[in-house]
Image (cartoon, rainbow, N blue to C red):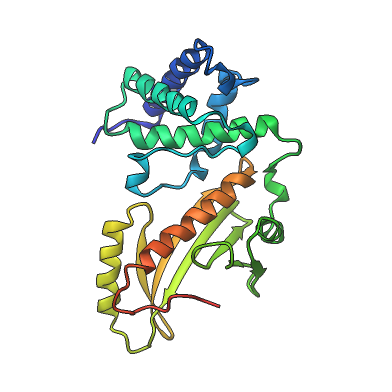
């Protein structure tokens, strides 16, 4: 694994983005991808929103990458593939390793797709930090074909519309959004060691999320948590996409429980 400082990574990535941006603008059939966007906006938005991109299953980076921009501004699939190839090619020119490029290029492109979407938005889709509340997030979930409710402690419990129910916590003091997934043992007598063994298997297979085991009052609990900062604003499309991906990774973990150690659904 190559070791780089944050400053070195930033410089290398910005150089790759400059090469990529110039390359796309030189191609008549691709230049509309950056319509109305200058290079500074592309770079600035990447640094603002990169931590909202959730890691994907390893196979995702090897298969056809899907567009994440709204359907009305998506480009033709062959053009999008050319854009991805251009980005990966210019990352190689900028000095990134062949092993780094598939994952990093997909994450970079997802942020660029958000920038493209913001350019065409009729209304603001990035909440200012002081606007963010648990009620606002709960309402946003419910307005997007999902079911969510506020718990007594203020956490948002989301169920229908997600593959596996989970909680979203808005930490106002640290300006963080935190996704929390839990699966409870089917019995308080279920050996913790068995669930820990299952957890180890899950972490080996579901590589995009870290799982752990905690002991609760009614037995062991399979637990996962993911947090990101909204101190620079909260892009709501990326929030919902991240929530669905977090839920999907938990569902993938639960599906590995062939011995019925855990309760499959919460109410």
**Residue at the right extreme?**
123
For residue 190, what is the image quadrant?
Answer: bottom left
Say which quadrant the N terminus sits in: top left
Residue sitting at 28 percent across and 72 percent down?
Answer: 196
**Observer-nearest of 247 and 255:** 255
Q: Left of 183 or right of it: where is 155?
A: right
**Observer-nearest of 93 and 1:** 93
Residue 164, position in %: x, y?
Answer: 49, 66
Task: Give the tally of numbered discs.
Answer: 0
**Residue at the top extreme?**
26
Residue 111, position in %: x, y?
Answer: 53, 35
**Residue at the bottom extreme?**
189
Residue 217, position in %: x, y?
Answer: 43, 85
Residue sitting at 50 percent across and 63 percent down?
Answer: 163
Residue sitting at 42 percent across and 86 percent down?
Answer: 218
Q: Left of 189 or right of it: where is 171?
A: right
For residue 10, what is the image quadrant?
Answer: top left
Residue sitting at 42 percent across and 64 percent down?
Answer: 251
Say which quadrant the C terminus sits in: bottom right
Above or below residue 180? Residue 64 is: above
Above or below residue 77? Residue 162 is: below
Residue 79, position in %: x, y?
Answer: 48, 25
For residue 118, what is the image quadrant?
Answer: top right
């Amino acid at each position: 694994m190559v070791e780089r400082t944050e400053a070195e990574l930033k410089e290398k990535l910005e150089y790759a983005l400059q090469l990529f941006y110039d390359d796309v603008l030189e191609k008549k059939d691709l230049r509309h991808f950056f319509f109305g966007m200058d290079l500074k906006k592309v770079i600035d938005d990447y640094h603002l929103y990169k931590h909202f991109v959730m890691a994907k299953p390893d196979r995702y980076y090897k298969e056809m990458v899907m567009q994440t921009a709204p359907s009305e501004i998506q480009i033709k699939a062959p053009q999008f593939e050319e854009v991805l190839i251009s980005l990966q090619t210019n990352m190689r020119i900028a000095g990134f390793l062949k092993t780094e490029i598939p994952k990093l290029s997909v994450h970079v492109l997802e942020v660029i797709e958000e920038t493209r979407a913001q350019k065409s938005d009729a209304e603001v889709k990035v909440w200012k930090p002081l606007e963010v509340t648990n009620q606002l997030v709960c309402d946003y979930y419910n307005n997007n074909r999902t079911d969510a409710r506020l718990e007594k402690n203020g956490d948002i419990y989301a169920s229908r519309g997600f593959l596996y129910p989970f909680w979203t916590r808005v930490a106002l003091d640290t300006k963080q959004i935190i996704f929390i997934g839990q699966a409870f043992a089917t019995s308080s007598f279920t050996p913790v060691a068995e669930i820990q063994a299952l957890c180890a298997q899950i972490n080996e297979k579901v590589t995009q999320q870290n799982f752990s085991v905690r002991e609760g009052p009614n037995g062991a609990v399979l637990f996962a948590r993911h947090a990101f900062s909204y101190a620079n604003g909260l892009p709501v499309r990326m929030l919902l996409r991240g929530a669905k991906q977090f839920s999907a990774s938990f569902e993938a973990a639960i599906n590995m429980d062939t011995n019925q150690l855990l309760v499959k659904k919460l109410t």
